[in-house]
Image (tube, rainbow, N blue to C red):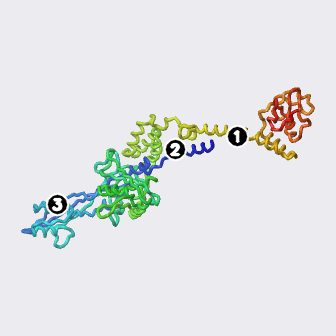
Amino acid sequence: MPRLAVIAGLGALGMLTMPMLHPHPSGSTDRVTPGAVRVESESHVSITLFDDRSQLQQVVREYDTELADGSGFTVTPDGVIVTATSVVQSDRDARIYAANRVFAEYFKVKIPADFERHTISDPDLNIRLQACYPPRTQNSTCNATVTTTVTAYPYLQPPLPQGLKAEILHTGDSPVAPAVLKVDPSGKEGLPTVPLGTVLGTSVESIDFMTLATPPSAKAPPKLDTAHFEPAGSRSFKKEDQPKVDKLIAAGHSQGAAVIDDYKSEVVGLLAGGGELPPTVTPVEEIRTALVAAGVTPRRGPVDVVFESALASYHNKLYGASIPVLQSVLSKRQDHAVAIEYLRIAQSKAGTAEDAAKKKPSPSPVAKQSGGVSAWVWITGGIVLVAAGVAIAVPVLLKRRRGGGDGNGGERSLDNAAMVTSWPAQTEVFRGAIGSHPSIPHQPPSDMSPPLGQAQLGQPMPVQVGQLGAQKFCTQCGMRLGHAHRFCGFCGHAADMP
C-alpha cells in the first residue's frame, strides 16, 4: 500500500536522521579539561646525625625528595584544588630516606637511598643505623625535621615553569579520600574551573579519567582514558576496562584524577588507589563533604561562563561566530590553553567549506527515502490509486443499489444524495433548445449545476425519455444520455430504450 510505504520510508528516515548516541561523544570533556591540574609534593628534610664514638660530633644534612605526584582539578576560580590525600600525604617516610643518605655519606657504607629500612654487616654501625630510623627516642642517633611542599601546575599556555605553591586545607583519613588545596590564582579573573556534579547517580555509565603525567602545556595536554561502570552508577568497572584502570593506577600519576560523567560533562568523582588498595572511585558526595570541612563552596567564574558560550558555536562548526567569543575568553584569561587552541582552529576554518554558516541548507529529510526514492512519489501514487478506486467503485455501487431497489424510492433517494455530493460528473451538459421543452427550465450554457436543480432531484420526471431531435435525457436526473447508453453516466439510472 502507498500509505504504508510512506510510513515505512519515514520511519527509516527517522532512524537515519536520529542523532547517533556514542558512549563517549565528541567534545563531552571540553567543559572539564580547562580546569585540569598536575599536583606534585616533595619533602625537605633537615637531619642531624650524632656520632659519639670518640667525641661527640653532629653531622647536619639537608635533603629534598619527591614524595608523591598525581592529578587534580580546580573547583573555584580563586584557586581551590581537589586531589587525593595520597598525593599530598604519602606513606613514604622522608625521615627514613634521610637516615639512609646521611649514614651512607658519613660512615662510607653502602645503603640504598630509598624509603626502606636496611641493615649493615658491621654490628656497631648497624645498631647506630637502627637507632637513626624514626620514631625518635632517648637513644636515637638522629634527629630529623620534615617540611612538605605541594606545587600545583594548572593547565595554562604558556605553562608556569615553577607552578603555584599550594596550601593544604584538608586531608582525609585514607589515601583515597579527597584532599583540598589552595593556590594563588595569579589572575584577576581567576583560574578555569571544572563543573562539579552533586551526586554520582545510578545512571552514570560512560566515564573518562583526566590525568596529567607531567606539568600540562599545549604539547602535553590532559590525557583522557575512557571506561564504563557496570552496572551503571556502581563504581565497579566493566571486565574489559579493568586492565586499563589497573595500568593507570600503576603509573602513579592518576591519583586524584577527575572522573567525568560523559552524559552531563561534569566531574562526579576522583580516582585513587594503588599498592594494597584497589583502584577506587571516590564519589562526588565525599568531595563536597571535604570542601565543606575546608570551608569552601565550589563555584564557577566569569572565564568559565564565556568559554562555555564559545563552545556552543565551536562544536556546531560555526567557526566564524565562535571567534569573537573565544577572544573574549582570552581577554579575561590570556593563558587559557583550550581557548587558545580552539581560537587557532576556528580562525583557520572560518569562512571555509567546513564552516557551517557557509553551507547551504540541506533538503528536508522527509523528501527522501532510503534507497533515494522521493516520498512524494509514494504520496502521489497513493492519491492516484485511491482516486481510481473511487471512480470504479461508485458507479458499480450505484448500479447495484438501483437494481436492488424496493420500489418505494428509498434507493433512489440514496442515489440522488450520492449524485449531489459528487457533482460535477463527466457527463455532458444539455445544450439544445431546452427552452421549448415544457418540463425542463432554461439554464445558461455556463451553469454547471444539475439541469433540474437539486430541490427536484427526488421527484420523478413526467416523461420516461425526454427527446429533442436526436438527443435523449435521463428521466431521473435530466442529464443527456449518450448514444446507445443503457445507463445514465451521471446517476446510473437505467434508460428505458424505445
Looking at the image, which is closer to me, 485 or 347?
485
The mark found on residue 407 in the picture is: none
Callout 3 secondary element: loop
Q: Sequence-wise, which precedes: disc 1 or disc 3?
A: 3
Q: Can see residue 197? A: yes
The mark found on residue 16 in the picture is: 2
Give x and y (percent) for residue 477: 85, 37
The mark found on residue 112 in the picture is: 3
> Could you say which quadrant of the image residue 130 lies in?
bottom left
Q: Sequence-wise, which precedes: disc 1 or disc 2?
A: 2
Around disc 3, counting alpha carbons within 10 Å, would you say few (fewer than 14), some (14 to 19), or many (20 or more)?
few
What is the C-alpha distance between the residues marked 1 and 2?
34 Å
Around disc 2, counting alpha carbons within 10 Å, would you say few (fewer than 14), some (14 to 19), or many (20 or more)?
few
275 with respect to 99 (left or right): right
Residue appearing at x 51%, y 44% in the figure: 16
Looking at the image, which is closer to me, 223 or 233?
233
